[in-house]
Structure formats: structure tokens, C-alpha cells
Image (cartoon, grey):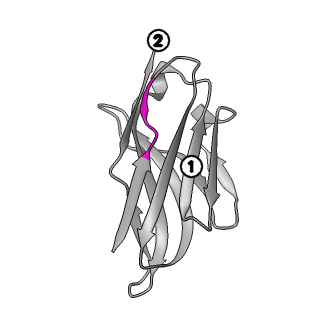
Amino acid sequence: QVRLVESGGGLVQAGGSLRLSCAASGSIFRINAMAWYRQAPGNQRELVARITSGGMTNYADSVKGRFTIYRDNAKNTVSLQMSSLKPEDTAVYYCNVDLVLITRPPGNYWGQGTQVTVSS
């Protein structure tokens, strides 16, 4: 089985910074893409940032220049450094990972979510 544990959410004032982290554990053979999504109340879940196993990244237009996604392949972690936060960044943030388990075919897995609240 796979376990994705997120950390780093919280309350911050507009203009502030937060870093989210997600650690994957289990019988992992290989991790492919890793990503962060978010979902605000009443909205659909949306992609925030994604990073491939080779380090290529893409970002939602709304966070370009403010957020940075990076990964540590040795530790099976993905992080999201968020700066210049705005109230509209308030949402539950989810870690998402494409990976291959030792005994299972490739699959897509979600973390439990971590709340980020930006006050004005």
C-alpha cells in the first residue's frame, strides 16, 4: 500500500509564505509525476503545480512566479514553496502522485489534504 502524508498548512497573512510537504511511503518501485492540487469551497479541484520525474514543471497561471514545486527523489517527497500568498489561495491543498508499486501496476494516489488559509 501507499501512504502520502502532507504537512505545512496553516494560517498566514496575505503576502506571507508557507511551504507544504508530502512524503510518500510504502512498497514503491518508482515515482513518476508528483503534483499539488487545491480545492476551495464551492470550487472544483484544480492543478496548482506538477513536476515530472525528470524535473520538468508546470504551474497554474494564477500561481506562476509565486509558487515553486520541487522534489527529493531520494526521500520520495514533493514540496510546494508558496510566497506572496493571496486570500484567493485559500483552499485545501492535496498531494497527488503517479507511482508504481512493487506488486501493483501504475496508479494515481491522493494525500488527505492540508488546509491553507490566507487572511487579508
Is residue 10 or residue 67 the one in the foreground?
10
Residue 50: percent from the left, percent from the top? Answer: 58, 53
In the picture as drawn, the residue positioned furthest to the front comes out as 75
Q: Residues within 10 Å of mark 2 (few under 14, many from 20)?
A: few
Q: Please tell me whether mark 2 sits on a helix, a strand or a loop.
A: loop
| Quarter occupied by the N terminus | bottom left
Q: Which residue is mark 2?
A: 120
Q: Residues within 10 Å of mark 1 (few under 14, many from 20)?
A: many
Q: Which residue is mark 1?
A: 79
From the viewer's perspective, is the residue at label 2 or at label 1 nearer? 1
Residue 14: percent from the left, percent from the top? Answer: 53, 17
Please give left or right for residue 27 compared with residue 67 in the image: left
Q: Please tell me whether mark 1 sits on a helix, a strand or a loop.
A: strand
Residue 100: percent from the left, percent from the top? Answer: 47, 78
Residue 108 falls in which quadrant of the image? bottom left
In the picture as drawn, the residue positioned furthest to the left comes out as 42
- Residue at image location 47% in from the left, 58% down from the top: 23
Q: Is residue 4 magenta?
A: no
The part of the chain drawn in magenta is 7-11
